[in-house]
Image (cartoon, helix red, strand yellow):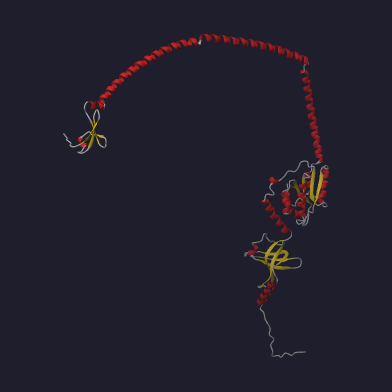
Amino acid sequence: MLEIIPNNLEITREIYTVSQLNQLAKSLLEGTFPLIWLSGEISNLSQPSSGHMYFTLKDETAQVRCAMFRFRNSLLSFTPQNGMQVLARAKVSLYEGRGEFQLIIEQMEEAGDGALRRAFELLKHKLAAQGLFNSEHKKTLPAFPKSIGVITSPTGAAIKDIISVLKRRMPLISIIIYPTAVQGSEAAAQIVKAIELANHRQECDVLIVGRGGGSLEDLWPFNEESVAHAIFNSELTIISAVGHEIDYTIADFVADVRAPTPSAAAELVSPQQTDLLQHLQLCYQSLSRQFNVFLQQAQQQIIWLTKRLQHPKQRLQTRAQQLDYLEQRLLQAQKQRLHQKQAEAHKLAIKLQLYNPQNLIKPLLMQHASLCQRLNKAVELLIKKNQTDLAQLSGALHNLSPLATLQRGYAIAYKQPEQTIVHNVTELQVGDKIINQLHQGKIHCIVEKIDND
């Protein structure tokens, strides 16, 4: 059905400005897409003075503009560069000013080898701070190992190179292979288990842990922290032989010895058979010369001792003669000793007669008797003198005694009740009681009158 619209009717149209369109598109994009992760290569990197970062993420067929603001830049653990593969967590948006589709980067990290190298450096610094690389923990290689353990892939080129070198240098050394994966997610756990098994069995003198060359990702099991601690805790000496000479892993830093290649590890741990044979030949020659010199010296000593050797009968005669000589000297010494003691006894007898105790006691007894007489006389004279002095002193004391004064008719007055001697009438009052001490007896009196005359 054909509908005819009159010419006088106007069709209603919604008209947007460019700014409105860009704003609407921005809202639509930011509201539709959540935060997403994407990978790509950095190109066209620009870092103006504002501190913000602008670049392009691209892959083989497409690219997208990106912006990362200053606050987010400060949280990066690496320095972005053109050509670097990265993983970015971003918000889909639109730059309204130019109407350009862009990503606002919230978080970014290295991808591929870059991320692995960053993880390698972080783990290396961590283990170094824990002391796992310190030289004082390194064990020395055995000089002559009887058995060598190898922890590697049983089908790889590394084990073939190690066996070839050991057979060439020292075929007597036994080889014990602890087969493990050396690549992939399970490799690290198998390597740790093999190291622990070798330490538990104690059937080898040294361990070679390694593999052939490869990329950083291929060698990554030897950069795992669990492998580093297993090597550090090993009682057996461990040689790390991972990759080529230019390849370095965490295992190289923790191990007791680092070999640039598996073949070099086999050479380090095994002595050269030809060198040992040559050394043994030199030792044999030196020992032979020394033995010949010793034998000659021993022969000369035997000849000299043979000349000094005497017949037993001759030695017995010599000893018998020495015995007779010693017997004569002993008898002569006994006689001299006897004469000496007899002379000493004679001198003592003479001294004893001169110093007879009885001769010494008689003068002493006479002296004692004389001293006793003198002592008795002196005592008698002293007694008489003391008796005379005592009589004189007794007479003088009697004259001074109050009793003698009382005998002459005097009395001593005592004031009552103080029992004090009255020296002056001023000490008394009428009515006071006094006691008069006479030569014989006492008189109790009361003072009736006091005269001062």
**For this rendering, which residue is in front, 2 or 401?**
401
Is 302 or 178 nearer to us in this picture?
178
Residue 323 location, x and y as percent? 71, 13
Q: Is residue 346 left or right of residue 252?
A: left
Looking at the image, residue 42 lies above or below residue 8: above
Residue 352 screen position, x and y as percent: 53, 10
Residue 302: tell me if it is visible: yes
Q: Quadrant of the C terminus?
A: top left
Instruction: Decide if residue 412 is on the left or right side of residue 95.
Output: left
Q: Is residue 219 visible?
A: no
| Residue 103 in picture, x, y percent from top left | 69, 68
Q: Quadrant of the N terminus?
A: bottom right
| Residue 255: percent from left, percent from top | 73, 48
* Quarter-of-image position of residue 309: top right
Question: Residue at 29% of width from left, 22% of height from top?
Answer: 394
Taking depth in this image into account, of 154 and 244 the one nearest to the observer is 154
Q: How many marks?
A: 0
Which quadrant holds residue 170?
A: top right
Task: Write the residue at 32% across / 19% down.
Answer: 387
Residue at the image position 71 percent from the left and 11 percent from the top: 324
| Residue placed most toward the observer, 254 or 375 | 375
Q: Is 451 above or below relative to 57?
A: above
